C-alpha cells in the first residue's frame, strides 16, 4: 500500500516537473520572439517596393514617347529633331512649350544630351511682382514653373529634383546667358521670346555652338515690352539660313481647350 502511494506521489511530481519545464520553454521562446521582433523593428528593407514607397519616391511619369496631337505639332517636333535652331511662334495653347520640354526630357533620359537649359526674359505680364525672397534660383523659379511641370510629368519629380541639384537641368534668366556657349551636349529652350529686345535676342543667338539644340518659342502678338520685340525681328532675319526652321502655329492648332480658341477670336476682333 505504501509503495502504491509513493508511486502516485512520484508520478504527480514528475508530471508537475514536466509541466513547469514546458512552461519555461514556452516562456523562453516567447521572450526570444519578442527580442527578435524588437531587433527587426530597427531593420529597414531597402528593397521594399510597397505601394506607399512607390507613391512617395517614384512619382508617376509618362514613359511613352511624345505623340503629336495635331499635324502642325508633328511638323514642329520633326523640325526640332532635324535642325539646330527652331522657332515656334503662334497663339497660346498650341503646345509650343510642351513639345519642346518633352523632347528635351527624352534627350536627357536617353543620354543624347547632358544638360537642359531653360531660360526666358524676366519680364512680368503687365504687373510688378516686387521683391521676391531667396537666392537668384529661388527668384527665377516662378518663371519656369510651367517647364518644371512638363519635366516632372515626363521624367518624374524625383529625377527632376536630382537634376536641378546637380546642374543637369538649369533655369536661369536670359540676362545670365551672356558669355556662355551652348555645345552639342546641351538642349536650350528660350520661352516667352516675344519679351526679348532685338539686342537680347542677338546676344542669345550668338551663344549657339556646333551641333547643339536650341528652341525659341513665343507669341509675337502677346509682347509685354514696348517697342520692337526680339522674336519678331529674329524671325525676319533668319529666313533661309541652313539648319534653322521657323514654324508658325495658327488658332486652329490650339489643343489646350476649345474655349481658348473662342476667346482668342473675341480678343482678335
Image: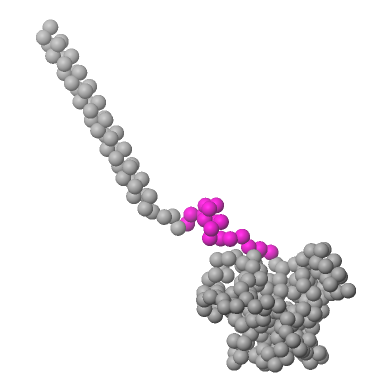
Q: Which quadrant, please, contains the C terminus?
A: bottom right
- Residue 195 image-quadrant placement: bottom right
**Magenta extent:** 47-64
Residue at image x 13%, y 14%?
A: 6
The residue positioned farthest toward the left in the image shown: 2
- Relative to 25, say whether 150 is above or below: below
- Relative to 139, say whether 36 is above or below: above
- Specify whether 101 is left or right of 35: right
Query: Which x, y percent locates residue 153?
Result: 64, 65
Task: Tell me if residue 48 is in the magenta stretch.
Answer: yes
Q: Which quadrant, please, contains the N terminus?
A: top left
Query: Which x, y percent locates residue 111?
Result: 60, 75
Please tell me whether the stretch drawn in magenta is mainly helix, strand or loop.
Answer: loop
Residue at image x 23%, y 28%?
A: 20
Residue at image x 55%, y 73%?
A: 163
- Specify whether 87 is left or right of 180: right
In this rendered view, identify the residue nearer to me: 208 or 40. Answer: 208
In this rendered view, identify the residue nearer to me: 209 or 122. Answer: 122
The residue positioned farthest toward the top in the image shown: 1
In this rendered view, identify the residue nearer to me: 9 or 48. Answer: 48
- Specify whether 212 is left or right of 239: left
Residue at image x 18%, y 21%?
A: 13
- Residue 66 image-quadrant placement: bottom right
- Residue 238 image-quadrant placement: bottom right
Query: Which x, y percent locates residue 109?
Result: 61, 72
Task: Tell me if residue 52 is in the magenta stretch.
Answer: yes
- Relative to 114, say whether 264 is above or below: above
Query: Which x, y percent locates residue 155?
Result: 61, 67
For the rendered model, the colour scheme is one colour
Amino acid at each position: 500500500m505504501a509503495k502504491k502511494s509513493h508511486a502516485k506521489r512520484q508520478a504527480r511530481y514528475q508530471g508537475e516537473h514536466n509541466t513547469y519545464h514546458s512552461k519555461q520553454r514556452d516562456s523562453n521562446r516567447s521572450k526570444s520572439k519578442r527580442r527578435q521582433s524588437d531587433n527587426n523593428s530597427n531593420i529597414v528593407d531597402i528593397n521594399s517596393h510597397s505601394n506607399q514607397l512607390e507613391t512617395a519616391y517614384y512619382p508617376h511619369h509618362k514613359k511613352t514617347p511624345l505623340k503629336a496631337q495635331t499635324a502642325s505639332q508633328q511638323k514642329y517636333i520633326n523640325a526640332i529633331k532635324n535642325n539646330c535652331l527652331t522657332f515656334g511662334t503662334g497663339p497660346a495653347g498650341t503646345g509650343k512649350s510642351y513639345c519642346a520640354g518633352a523632347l528635351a526630357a527624352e534627350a536627357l533620359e536617353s543620354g543624347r544630351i547632358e544638360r537642359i537649359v531653360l531660360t526666358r526674359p524676366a519680364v512680368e505680364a503687365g504687373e510688378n511682382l516686387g521683391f521676391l525672397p531667396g537666392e537668384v534660383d529661388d527668384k527665377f523659379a516662378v518663371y519656369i514653373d510651367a517647364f518644371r511641370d512638363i519635366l516632372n510629368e515626363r521624367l518624374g519629380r524625383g529625377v527632376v529634383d536630382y537634376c536641378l541639384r546637380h546642374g543637369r537641368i538649369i533655369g536661369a534668366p536670359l540676362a545670365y546667358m551672356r558669355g556662355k556657349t551652348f555645345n552639342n551636349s546641351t538642349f536650350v529652350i528660350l520661352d516667352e521670346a516675344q519679351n526679348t529686345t532685338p539686342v537680347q535676342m542677338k546676344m542669345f543667338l550668338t551663344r549657339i555652338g556646333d551641333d547643339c539644340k536650341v528652341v525659341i518659342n513665343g507669341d509675337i502678338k502677346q509682347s509685354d515690352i514696348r517697342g520692337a520685340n526680339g522674336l519678331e525681328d529674329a524671325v525676319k532675319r533668319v529666313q533661309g539660313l541652313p539648319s534653322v526652321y521657323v514654324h508658325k502655329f495658327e488658332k486652329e492648332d490650339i489643343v489646350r481647350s476649345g474655349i481658348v480658341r473662342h476667346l482668342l477670336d473675341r480678343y482678335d476682333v
